[in-house]
Image (cartoon, rainbow, N blue to C red):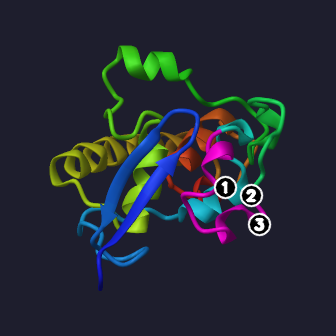
């Protein structure tokens, strides 16, 4: 695969460039097995429809054809489960969860990782965070009947934000 370089121009980054050294959607770390692609997440409804709205030139157009995007700010009704399940970006910044190259957080990292960007140390950190969220899968399985999508909707939505398909629990 030839290396691709992407230049970003959006409201949070101007002129940021990164190289993609892996094929799109391939070459993931063995322990990283997301259940949803970024496109599937956007189509299901995540982050109140207000996440990558100004980043559409960075990612494949196909990701946005059926994406549930708000044009008026974050709106929980755009989320698959219709509930707010995100902390404000400021909280993520205060907790030190934001990597400077990905100022929007985990999902931005995941989108760029999916596109083929690799930053070994940061990739390991983000995959470790993704794996830690799995504890919520066990909590849902313990508390909810299989297929009861009305049980713990906020927790289910949060799992969707981390590429776990909580509709299947």
Check disc 1 and report the residue beneath it: 42
Residue at 42% across / 53% down in the picture?
Answer: 110
Q: Which range of residues does the magenta coloring cover?
A: 51-66
Name the foreground residue: 74 vs 57.
Answer: 57
Name the foreground residue: 119 vs 16.
Answer: 16
* Secondary-structure class at tag 3: helix
Residue 77, image quadrant: top right
165 drawn magenta: no
Q: Position of residue 117 (x, y in %)?
A: 32, 61
* Secondary-structure class at tag 1: helix
Q: Whole-Å distance between the Cαs marked 3 and 1?
A: 10 Å
60 drawn magenta: yes
Check disc 2 and report the residue beneath it: 67
Check the image and report above or below for 165 versus 60. above
Q: Position of residue 106 (x, y in %)?
A: 42, 42
Check disc 3 and report the residue beneath it: 65
Nearer-N-terminus badge (3/1): 1
* Quadrant that contains the N terminus: bottom left
Nearer-N-terminus badge (1/2): 1
Whether tag 1 and tag 2 are in contact, CB under 8 A, the answer is yes
């Amino acid at each position: 695969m030839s290396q691709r370089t992407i230049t970003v121009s959006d409201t949070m980054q101007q002129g940021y460039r990164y190289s993609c050294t892996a094929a799109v959607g391939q070459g993931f770390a063995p322990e990283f097995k997301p259940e949803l692609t970024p496109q599937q997440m956007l189509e299901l409804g995540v982050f109140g429809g207000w996440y990558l709205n100004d980043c559409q030139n960075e990612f494949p157009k196909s990701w946005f054809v059926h994406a549930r995007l708000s044009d008026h700010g974050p709106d929980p009704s755009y989320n698959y489960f219709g509930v707010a399940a995100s902390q404000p970006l400021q909280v993520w910044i205060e907790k030190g969860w934001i990597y400077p190259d990905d100022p929007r957080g985990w999902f931005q990292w995941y989108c760029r990782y999916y596109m083929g960007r690799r930053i070994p140390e940061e990739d390991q950190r983000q995959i470790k965070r993704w794996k830690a969220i799995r504890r919520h899968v066990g909590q849902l399985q313990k508390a909810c009947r299989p297929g009861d999508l009305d049980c713990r909707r906020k927790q289910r939505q949060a799992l969707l934000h981390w590429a776990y398909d909580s509709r299947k629990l």
